[in-house]
Amino acid sequence: MQGSGRNQGWHLVAEELREKLGRFSGRPRFNDEFEEAFEFYFGESVDDLQDSLDENDYDRFMEWFLFDYRLSNGHRLIEIFDLEHGAELSRQARRLLRAWEKAHLTVLELQGRDGEIDRYLDLLTGKQYEVAGCPKDPPLPRWSIVIARPLQVGRHWEFSHSVTVLPPISKERLLQLVRGEYRRFCYASGCLSVEQFLRDHGYFFNDLLVELDLGVPAHMLEGDDAHRVVHCKAIFRARDVNRVSQRLLAYGDIRTARHGRLVMLEAEDSPGRVLAELHFAPGRLVVHCWSRERLEISKRRLVDRLKGLVLHLVDAFEELHARGPGGGQAFGPAGQDEVAAVVDGGRDAAGPGEGGAGGFDFAAGTSARAAYDDYVDSWLSEPLAALDGLPPKALLGRPLGRVRLVELLKKLEHLQETRLRKGRGLATAEEIRRQLGLPADSGVFYPLGTRPELWNSPSESQVAQRVREMLDCAGYGTSYGDSAAWMWWDYCSRAYPVMRKPLAWAAAVHYCVALVENWPVTQQRVAEYYSVSVSTLASNARRIINLLELEPFDDRYCVEPLRAPSGRRGRDEGEDEAEEADQLGTILALASRVRAAVHQFARDHESLHDRAQEYFASHVRRSGFEPEWRECFLDWFHFDWHIPVMGGRTLAEGAFDFADIGEELREVLYLWLNRRPSFYVVEGLVEGGSALPGRLGRRLTLRDLVSGKVSVVDWMRLGGEVRPKDLVFARLVGVRDRVISLGCVLSFPAPRKEHLQRAIEEDRALVNRWNERYLTWEEFRSRYSERLYAIAFGLREPEPEDED
């Protein structure tokens, strides 16, 4: 039973009211309305989906049908129930019913828990909710994101039965998409009420769940696996255990722990910093450490000192076990005098040093403490993929950097708490937060209808203000200024640009707004409007487009969207241009779904990621191009790398063969297999086309630099205008009857052609010598595509200091 005392009585009334509302919504008189609402919500009829519909999806629909959907008479079901049966209810039930009629779905963040009450922050309205938790359900990890409908029940709130729980990694994109939908709602209706938007667009949350990527590799948040605190063991064969022990004790960094056990210090002058424990058994030397990095250091030191006295046999790794039903101990807070290590009774039974899974009774000690400190230090000072390749400490001096760190630590804390509940892992988020001097609160957030006010510098604020003014002067409404402000804020939160000429950045943001809105405007025209140089505008716009991965009709930022299914919103379809935009927009959406399906399949093979990244980085230098490097790596990882353990298949081929992705996506993916990237020369424009980046209807004629094959491309993701004879590096794929670029596109000016040709010829000659035969261009691209990326990144001139 929820709550206690008076609120417990309110809970019983609420449960009875829910039951009555459920029976009322299921009456046969509403069957026709139900079928129309169903098709509107899902885009398909009941007959088409009844066998495959997920129970959670159906529950979300039924709640929306009851609370939000307007019937043919203009009323909602809950309102009709009030009109017909409200007088029959008790005074308490009527009070709840009237409050529930105003309830709407929203996005909430779990801030903490006080006893049986969860504290939530509404990220869309700014309201605070104290929600009575359900005793039958386990408490959610802190910082969980919840899509739910808060219903007032006495002094507290309860959620309706349909609740969607998401990890905090979904928060940023979820809010971006909701802001975009609200922006389009305001533009179309002229209404600025957030509550009205949430009431009228409750169906939108179901659409959102399809677009969200709810998984993120742990290394993105935690850094290199080498610094993970994990029990590591190396086993050596020892010909003479006594002789091995005597030789080791001759070194100043070796100490005796007790009989049959030694400790290896990090250095002779660091008596409190233990690198590893050394255990002896008949014919065996076993090394125990608390990170892979420390194990490798210990192994190298032992092999160098013992030479032929030992022979390395095998390494083993085991994740840290947490306090919980399974026993064992997790690392304690940083303030503790000692850090407790894992002691699993089952393993102790095997006896010390036997070399199998057992034999490890390494108790709390300085080795574990040192590994824990190493992990925290490495997290603070080394580049993180989740921070676009920047180390956390580098962001402390920037206001938006601190905001990003607060959000990143929420994700890390949620990940670690989830692991701890499964009986493994350790908690470092609080210690990292303490060392960075960051608060443990919710950080900075902006409800719907507000614009960001926090910036890294006054210059960034000036850019946002200037773009709004110029868009207003050009006759565009406030929704476009809002789009520009959020686009610029998202970029500054990740790139931290240093500006000498804010006006040039304002022009770049204006151009990016034009790109997502599909306006027929050139960079030359925007540059003249702001009185800046075209080259500077193009350079800045390319950075924004590449980092934010902007595309035409981007749901995060566009104000005038493509026509949506089910007639929910749209444009006049009578014009040919709108019809063409709709068709190509559908093609781009389909390509995005296929790309997401491959990405999902790759997440199921995450163990391959680090190996692939190490190999790709050995060919392609990443310095200075982190966002583009990361995107290119993922494209190569998913579409080009032939994986030995998968029989030489690529992940894309594996997804095609084994993933359950549906026939429509499978047909498109089939066209993408064996489509490698290449270098192309821009021959010109097909009649009626345009070279404006992002403009729908643009059709470029490209000629392969090596094979001479000509391709006509319907859409290409470019960061700036291209002219005839310019060069591009891209992967071209087919989607139905269109040809588009997939992933990152790198462009180069025409004068680099000779240098590029020479680089390709030299690399092909080298590969031919390796293979002792001549490889065709197709063979070279198929087997050595990573070298193409290396040539492309090597061709790029280092980014100059900002002139602006």
Image: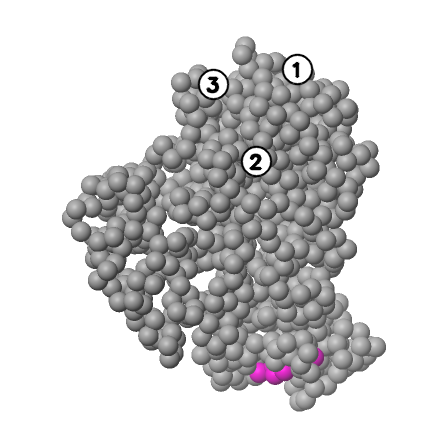
Label 3: element kind: helix
x and y, in percent, of residue 442 in the image? 60, 61
The answer to the question of whether label 3 and label 2 lie on touching residues, with beta carbons closer than 8 A, is no
**Identity of the amino acid at label 3?**
Glu
The secondary structure that dominates the magenta segment is: loop
Q: Is residue 531 magenta?
A: no
- Region in magenta: 361-366
**Identity of the amino acid at label 2?**
Ser
First in sequence, mark 3 or 1: give its number: 3
First in sequence, mark 1 or 2: give its number: 2
x and y, in percent, of residue 453 in the image? 67, 48
| Image-based side of 213 in relation to 777, left or right | left
Q: Nearer the viewer, mark 1 or mark 2?
A: 2
| Image-based side of 149 in relation to 551, left or right | left
Distance from disc 3 to disc 1, alpha carbons, whole Å, reads 25 Å
Say whether residue 476 is visible.
yes
In the image, residue 679 above or below residue 295: above
In the image, residue 583 above or below residue 170: above
Q: Nearer the viewer, mark 3 or mark 1?
A: 3
**Identity of the amino acid at label 1?**
Pro
| Image-based side of 164 in relation to 65, left or right | right
Question: Crowding near pointer 1: few (<14 within 10 Å), some, many (20+)?
Answer: some
Label 2: element kind: helix
In the image, residue 60 above or below residue 357: above
